[in-house]
Image (cartoon, grey):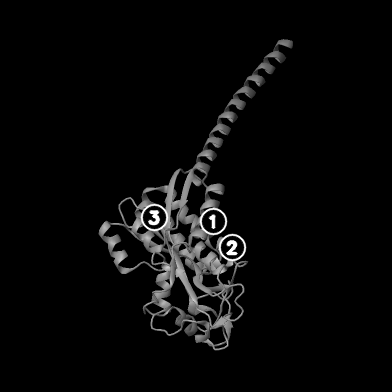
Amino acid sequence: MKFNKFLLFMIIAAFAVVLAACGSDGDEENSSGKNKASAQAGADLEGNVVIDGSGTVYPLMARLAEEYMVNEQENVSVEVSRAGTSAGFKKFLVDNGTDFNDASRQIKDEEASEADSLGIEVKELKVALDGLTFVVNKDNDWATEMTPEQLVSIFLADSTVEKWSDINPDWPDEKINAMGPNENHGTYEFFYESILDKQDMKSTINLQQEYSTLVNLVSEDKNGIAFFGFGYYVNNGDKLQAVAVDFGNGAVEPALDTIAEDGAYADFTRPVFTYLNVNHAKEKPQVKDFAIYVMNNINKFAGETGFAPIPENEAKENISFLEGLK
């Protein structure tokens, strides 16, 4: 009887060992499957993403790059520079050029033709809305509101305006020191083409490569006035004041709730872009991944860098295109 009980115990013990082994194999298979699925869903990427172009768009793209490297792909290096829109396209439209070119204007016909001749497929990605902003010194207590025509007269070559009193006899009889970004920048081109209607600018306008230089110059000059993107004004509001513009229905200050293609500040509102080298996105997973990240998160960071958001449906259309790249 004792022998039978012992035999039964050994049989049960052996059966338990077999079950445990089978269960362990199953767990290992399940665990392995889950790990593989997880790796496929959120693969770790590596390599570089190289971006150049617009100084206006730079703060937004730099912010997105930082977030991406810290929270999404720590082994991917996203390098963001700001040569200016036009200078950036020269680095973008070459063999082995940059992956993205930020632009505060749309690509020109000759630039698109150059891309075609090089076999570069280019995708325009609208990333935000910007308001062209005119800024003056904090101590300027007269030119706080102006019409578009008055602003244009300061910069236009054919204009007789040289002093503030030429605009309004009640204003100081002092020379206006007008400034702006140079020809490397899409903001210059937008101003020249859309605001000046391709009329010549005065040769005395102080044109600068760096927006920070313009901020400093105007902040130190009571008679200074300059134009650039709204974001640079927002980030330097302690040094400068924005000119409210009267488009015909009362003065409107540039702000996130007035900057819109159909808003109160519409006449000085423009879309800004980044242009993607689609060939690179197909060849380099990190470039495609960053492009998708940008369009998924662009409106999240637009406001904090001085841009108005784009419609969500436009962002989704670009995401669908990017996800379909193979």
* Disc on the earlier residue, 1 or 3: 1
Could you tell which of marks 2 and 1 lies nearer the N-terminus? 1
Q: Which residue is mark 2?
A: 304
Q: Secondary structure at mark 2?
A: helix
The spot of residue 43 in percent (x, y) is 49, 44
Amino acid type at circle 1 is Arg
Q: Which residue is mark 3?
A: 325
Mark 1 = which residue? 63
Q: Position of residue 52 (x, y in %)?
A: 42, 56
Q: Where does the N terminus fall, quadrant-wise?
A: top right
Q: Tell which of 170 and 60 is nearer to you.
A: 170
Describe residue 315's horizontal placement relative to residue 27 as left or right. Answer: left
User: What amino acid is found at the position of numbered circle 2 in the picture?
Assistant: Glu
Q: Are marks 1 and 3 in contact (CB under 8 Å)?
A: no
Compared to residue 12, the image places residue 309 above or below, namely below
Nearest-to-viewer mark from 1 and 3: 1
Q: Secondary structure at mark 3?
A: loop
Snapshot quadrant of residue 297: bottom right
User: Residue at 35% of width from left, 56% of height from top?
Assistant: 91
User: To which quarter of the image does residue 27 belong?
Assistant: top right
Number of numbered tags placed on the structure image: 3
Whether residues under marks 2 and 1 lie with C-beta atoms below 8 angstroms apart, the answer is yes
Q: Nearer the viewer, residue 26 or 303?
A: 303
Q: Secondary structure at mark 1?
A: helix
